[in-house]
């Protein structure tokens, strides 16, 4: 018994000694390295470019395409698209490529003062349709799947509804709020000070990325206090260290929000809640979600403070498709999309769900097959 306890103590001491050494070595590397070198490492080609708009096609050596329907990933405003490719061990685009999907991403670029006039209409009626057309052409596919995170999911839904795009076969929405009046603190703040926020935006122009970053950090004040202590305790773990830098880059590199788009979102989405009511229009096109016939998979987290569960869950009742699935995943607003549990609880289920819906099929499926897919979606949504 005594020898067993002694052996356990010796093993624990060796583990802690190894970790102490790794903390020292990794700590020196962390102090001298450029944190931007770990993000956005997956190779890609730019298959289309117009002004600031880019469409990227990602690829990896040895990864073969198994599904004819390509996936176009859509980022939200305010963040750079590297969040889909944080670092090699936490890359959504690489994960999908390895699973056999043709993966594309739309990059809207970084707004400057000349883009203050840009409205959400430009994204929904021009840039996203253009990206979809370019992806279908490059992938030689009649159909396409869209995957959006947060506002990227709103863009995917709005495009599909407003443009009545029947080429969109599948939609994946991650942490995408639809009923804005169920957004808790944000809904309350918008109703209370929405007009003041609009007036400020008219004065300052584009909403600075630094302001968005500060607001985001204020949502988790204790985490900001303890994060460097957590880093030190886990510096023996290189993946934790890489994740720390990647998430810092994410929050620290927020980009400007175009003035006109911010005002439009604040008024029509947040204050008037037009999307979930079926009253939202872009130009002369109404984005009625009941017109969405694409298969839908939506993810939400009960710990998400930015896209609360109730606001995100509303998409299931809002869309017109019968093939719809809703899943609950762990993590906060960033964690559900790219945190440690995301590959198991979001990325893997998304590829598993997309796989049978991304194979070659006739443009018009039989009523029996449509009913079978719808029944499968309802069963999954009930779990």
Image: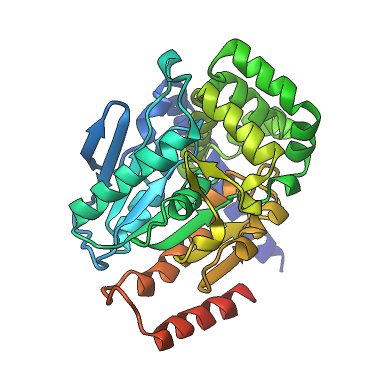
Quarter of the image where one finds residue 290: bottom right
The quarter of the picture where the N terminus appears is bottom right
Quarter of the image where one finds residue 167: bottom left
Front residue (pair 17, 78): 78
User: Is 102 situated left or right of 147 in this image?
Assistant: left
User: In the image, is residue 68 above or below residue 212?
Assistant: below
Quarter of the image where one finds residue 28: top left
Front residue (pair 383, 99): 383
Q: Is residue 89 visible?
A: no
- Which residue: 80% across, 37% down? 188
Q: Position of residue 27 (x, y in %)?
A: 49, 28
- Which residue: 20% across, 52% down? 137
Q: Position of residue 20 (x, y in %)?
A: 55, 37
Q: Position of residue 26 (x, y in %)?
A: 46, 33
What colouring does the structure picture have?
Answer: rainbow
- Which residue: 35% across, 37% down? 40
Report the residue that reaches farthest toward the top: 203
Count of marks, rendered view? 0
- Which residue: 27% across, 49% down? 133
User: In the image, is residue 15 above or below residue 228?
Assistant: below
The quarter of the picture where the C terminus appears is bottom right
User: In the image, is residue 379 above or below residue 175?
Assistant: below
User: In the image, is residue 254 above or below residue 301?
Assistant: above
User: Is 383 situated left or right of 338 in this image?
Assistant: right
Q: Position of residue 251 (x, y in %)?
A: 55, 30
Q: Is residue 189 visible?
A: yes
Report the residue that reaches farthest toward the bottom: 368
């Amino acid at each position: 018994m005594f020898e067993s306890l002694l052996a356990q103590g010796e093993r624990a001491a060796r583990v802690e000694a190894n970790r102490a050494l790794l903390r020292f070595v990794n700590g020196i590397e962390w102090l001298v390295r450029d944190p931007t070198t770990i993000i956005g490492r997956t190779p890609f080609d730019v298959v289309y470019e117009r002004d600031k708009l880019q469409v990227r096609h990602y690829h990896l050596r040895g990864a073969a395409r198994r599904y004819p329907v390509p996936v176009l990933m859509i980022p939200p405003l305010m963040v750079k698209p590297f969040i889909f490719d944080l670092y090699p061990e936490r890359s959504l685009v690489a994960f999908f490529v390895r699973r056999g999907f043709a993966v594309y991403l739309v990059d809207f670029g970084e707004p400057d003062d000349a883009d203050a006039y840009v409205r959400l209409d430009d994204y929904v009626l021009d840039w996203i349709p253009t990206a979809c057309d370019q992806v279908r052409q490059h992938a030689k596919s009649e159909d396409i799947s869209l995957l959006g995170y947060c506002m990227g999911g709103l863009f995917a839904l709005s495009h599909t509804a407003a443009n009545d795009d029947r080429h969109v076969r599948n939609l994946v929405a991650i942490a995408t709020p639809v009923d804005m009046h169920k957004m808790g603190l944000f809904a309350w703040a918008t109703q209370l000070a929405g007009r003041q926020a609009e007036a400020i935006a008219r004065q300052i122009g584009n909403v600075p990325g630094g302001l968005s970053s500060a607001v985001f950090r204020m949502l988790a004040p204790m985490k900001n206090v303890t994060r460097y202590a957590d880093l030190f305790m886990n510096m023996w773990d290189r993946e934790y260290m890489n994740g720390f830098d990647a998430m810092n880059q994410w929050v620290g590199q927020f980009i400007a929000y175009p003035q006109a788009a911010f005002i439009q979102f604040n008024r029509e989405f947040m204050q008037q809640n037009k999307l979930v009511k079926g009253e939202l229009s872009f130009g002369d096109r109404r984005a009625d979600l009941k017109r969405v016939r694409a298969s839908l998979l939506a993810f939400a987290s009960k710990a998400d403070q930015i896209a609360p569960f109730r606001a995100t869950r509303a998409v299931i009742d809002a869309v017109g498709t019968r093939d719809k699935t809703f899943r609950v995943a762990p993590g906060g607003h960033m964690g559900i999309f790219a945190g440690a549990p995301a590959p198991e609880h979001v990325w893997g289920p998304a590829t598993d769900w997309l796989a049978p819906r991304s194979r070659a099929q006739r443009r018009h499926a039989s009523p029996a097959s449509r009913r079978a897919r719808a029944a499968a979606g309802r069963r999954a949504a009930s779990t």
